[in-house]
Amino acid sequence: MSIVFLFVSALCWTLFVFARKKLVASETPLALTVAFNVGAIPLYCLAFFLSAEPDSLTLVNDISDLNLSYWIPSFVAAGLAALAAVGFITALKLGDIARVIPVLALTPVISTLAAGWLLGESLNLSQWLAMSVTVIAIAGAQGGLHHVRGKPFLLMLLVCLGWGTGIVFDKQALSHSGPFFHGIVQTILGSLLLLAYALISSTSVRVQSGVLRLLPALVVFVAAVVFQWVALSGLDAGIVETVKRSVGIIGALLGGLLLFKEAITKSQVQWCLVILACIPVILQPEV
């Protein structure tokens, strides 16, 4: 069942990327990031109180039930997410998006290594080989890494580190909490950190368009995160990150073709076929 949640999450992430691509034409990336974090808080709160999360009422009545085993990885995950968001926005300002985005293909490698170190998770040889080929294919489908250099490249490596290790700390925290409570904590902490950055950098986070225009993307964003967290309960963090990126690049190319009339090259089709061939190997049960 975790695999089903993983693919639903990956699909939601792909839809969210398209929604954000449309919204960023009239909004700044930082304003959108803050808006989605702040806007997600009431959705998580509503889901938390309506859900049957284990000990949900206990967590509200006695917050001390969540000991340091939850709070430490939760705070680290929120800090890494905020760091990655700021790094991503800064990298986009300094470099052409088409040139820096391929660096994100390295995120699954970081997730797998971090999960091995912090959680004791490990892939077998065939999974490692499939993941390595997938990373190369994802980067290849996005134009490769040969022309990415300088400060934008270093910033995107920082983003990979933030997102790649953040998912591992999320998994640690989620072993002591339900996804909706964790969502409340993460969005509150993330919002505070991003607002602090906006204040320090004197950057406006005011949303120009109406809030209702953001609502569909906000719902998809929350669904993507929640399903990803649920998938983490039964799958290795590195596998979740690899499949998410794999489905994301294929969905981005297909969506770009169907929705934005963007051309797909022959080499991109070939890279996508390689990715599709690797996914079943990555998802095989470990031996």
Image (cartoon, rainbow, N blue to C red):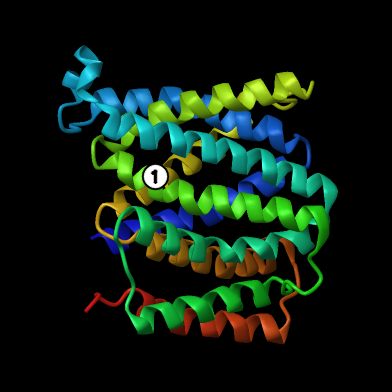
Quadrant into which the C terminus falls: bottom left
In the displayed structure image, the side of residue 180 where residue 78 appears, left or right:
right
Image coords of residue 106 (percent x, y) = 58, 65
Residue, x 84% and y 48% (percent of image)? 94
Residue, x 72% and y 27% (percent of image)? 209
Residue, x 71% and y 38% (percent of image)? 29
Residue, x 16% and y 20% (percent of image)? 58
In the displayed structure image, the side of residue 162 where residue 195 appears, left or right:
right
Quadrant into which the N terminus falls: bottom left
Image coords of residue 150 (percent x, y) = 82, 58
Image coords of residue 104 (percent x, y) = 62, 60
**Closer to us: 256 or 177:** 177
| In the rendered image, the vertical position of residue 131 relative to residue 107, given as above or below | below
Looking at the rendered structure, the secondary structure element under dot 1 is helix
Image coords of residue 279 (percent x, y) = 42, 77
In the displayed structure image, the side of residue 134 where residue 202 appears, left or right:
right
Quadrant hosting residue 284:
bottom left
Residue type marked 1: Phe
Q: Specify whether residue 135 is in view.
A: yes
- Numbered circles on residues, count: 1
**Closer to us: 157 or 140:** 157
| In the rendered image, the vertical position of residue 142 relative to residue 281, given as above or below | above
| In the rendered image, the vertical position of residue 100 relative to residue 191, given as above or below | below
Q: Which residue is mark 1?
A: 169
